Image (cartoon, rainbow, N blue to C red):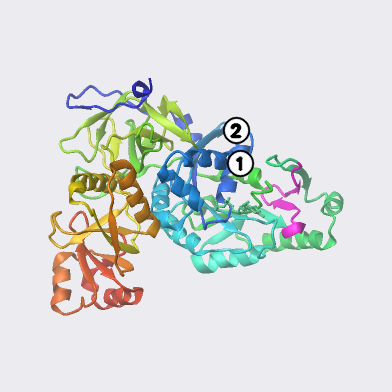
Amino acid sequence: HHEETRLFATTTTTTTTTEPYKAPATEIERRRNLAIISHPDSGKTTMTEKLLLYGGALQQAGAVRQKAEQRATQSDFMEMEQERGISISSTVMNFDYNGLRVNILDTPGHQDFSEDTYRALAAADNAVMLLDAAKGLEPQTRKLFEVCRLRNLPLFTFVNKMDRPALTPYEIMDQIEAEFGLETHPILWPIGDGDRFKGVLDRTTNIVHLYTKPTQRGGKAEVQEVPMEDEDTLKSLIDDQELFDKLLEDQELLQELIPPLDMERVMAATQSPLFFGSAMTNFGVQLFLDKFCDMGTKPMGRLAADKQEDEGEFLIAPEHQEFTGFVFKTQANLDPKHRDRLAYVRVVSGVYEKGMKVGHSRSKPAKKYNLAQAQALFGSDRTTVELAYPGDVIGINNPGNFAIGDTLYTGNSKVAFPGIPSFSPEKFAYIRSPNPSDYKSFRKGMDQLLDEGAIQALRQRNDDGGGPLMLAAVGQLQFEVVQARLKNEYNVDSLMEPLSYTLARWVDGGWDAVDKADADGKLFGIMVVQDRWKRPVLLFRNDWKAASLAEEEKYLELKPWSQ
Ligand code: GDP
């Protein structure tokens, strides 16, 4: 029966002798994980699908979307996704390819859910920036790039939709260099664009890959490989004098102008390997996958707070002899029939084994949980995971114990990875329950959603929970999800009253700094509130006001993030 096969988490206070849970080096070495960042409509869904297709995880392109649609019909909450044609929930997909295990961390494309994307990036070790060749950098790419930069994630750039009229590759390279200060190193170089997109030059092998459009919808592209030296064959196959000449010219120019590929710089995120292709027509996708598998980094360790020193951090490497992992996302009611809630855990070190007991960083006194069963999610399919290794993501049943940022670990010494910082909110509204009789359910629902990290809460200074509750979000849709979930899962109505503030700044200088600024009359028109941890937050009506206050009253130490 379903109930019995679900993960079962029990609390226990008895300590058992822990076994070493060290991960085998081969399992660490063979893992590659990535998150794709892009502006909506650049082709992320299509690209993901094609990677799965070439990775052998899908028989036919289109299946990811179909799965998403099937799932979307399962609940009202999911209906919202479907109606708006957006993906709210990120899933993790994996496949084995040439002996490697590739994990793709899907990230929601809609900007209102950039907070979830941010968290998915905390679990990733490589990022792929997908651009629309006609548009280059777009607002959402810029925002997400900043997050990758904060994390120093190695960044691969794939310029998509080359089968449409495109900016020149040089224009795109210049744009990335000028705006991000990031040097690109072309690995695949396009031959033509739009209807004349013929294929790509692989600059690492000097072999040209010429494509013909797949005859069958969803099929793979036919490829002909011709070495650059074989000019006669190349010329006749490209069958376009101008493009052929341009290819020779570009090749020479690139050899002269482009600094060499430097893997150390790629790992330090100061150089980005650059690819051109077309996900829809499959051009360049498999080549990209091959190169990514070669060049992408294996799972990295994570810094944990140092308990002995009470300050500072130390690195927990994947080779560490105990299991550690952190929750980077929680999700409720994937399947309303079972009302299940999942916590997604990124394994940092060691081995996850079915049935293992783990410590929990946040609980005081320290609790142990029995992870009887974890799941791997693939679209709407789930499979039970017996073993998971560093770099993997597992979904564990979450009856309410696990929140975003929590660390799970084996062994007797407590491990706590630092929390995942939240995105700076830009929308604010009061929320309340219109029916006094619903108050308890409303409160319970809100508490759970806040624990989950679905949204942030702000209150008046010194309010211990009795005063008005304000929600802060990155986008309007997050509010709507909260309201829909309160209704579906807790059966309570809610009323929202939007506020006209558009920007939040955390005051690192603390409450004394707030008092000083207030006494000096500097906080006129600014709302002073506190976050869940009673830290001071200022709300502004415009960017300019925030910028001038930060500039003039330096002691406030205004920060866009809550750490
Ligand atoms: P997402 O919003 O980033 O997930 O983008 P989708 O994968 O849903 O793609 C957005 C639109 O662009 C869809 O209509 C796709 O068919 C189309 N598209 C995706 N990749 C390509 C491509 O390589 N070439 C062309 N011409 N269209 C593409």
Q: Using the image, determine if residue 185 lies above or below residue 486.
A: below
User: Can residue 213 be found in the magenta stretch?
Assistant: yes
- Say whether residue 563 is visible: no
The x, y position of residue 83, in whole percent, is: 49, 50
To which quarter of the image does residue 415 belong?
top left
Horizontal relation, residue 357 to residue 380: left or right: left
Whether disc 2's CB lies below 8 Å from ligand 1 is answered: no
The x, y position of residue 87, in whole percent, is: 48, 48
Q: CA distance from mark 1 to mark 2?
A: 23 Å
Q: Amino acid at mark 2?
A: Asn
The x, y position of residue 458, in whole percent, is: 23, 59
Horizontal relation, residue 256 to residue 441: left or right: right
Please name whichever residue, 100 or 384, is drawn nearer the observer in this view of the structure: 384
Residue 62 — which label? 1
Horizontal relation, residue 140 to residue 190: left or right: left
Whether disc 1's CB lies below 8 Å from ligand 1 is answered: no
Q: Which residue, given by chain and number where applicable, does mark 2 sit on?
A: 98
| Quadrant placement of the N terminus | top left
Q: Secondary structure at mark 1?
A: loop
The tag earlier along the polypeptide, 1 or 2, is 1
Horizontal relation, residue 267 to residue 211: left or right: left
Answer few, some or many: residues within 10 Å of disc 2's Cα (few below 14, many 20 plus, some between 14 and 19): few
User: Can residue 255 be found in the magenta stretch?
Assistant: no
Please name whichever residue, 32 or 268, is drawn nearer the observer in this view of the structure: 32
Q: Secondary structure at mark 2?
A: loop
Q: Nearer the viewer, mark 1 or mark 2?
A: 1
Q: Using the image, determine if residue 205 lies above or below residue 323.
A: below
What range of the chain is rendered magenta? 194-215
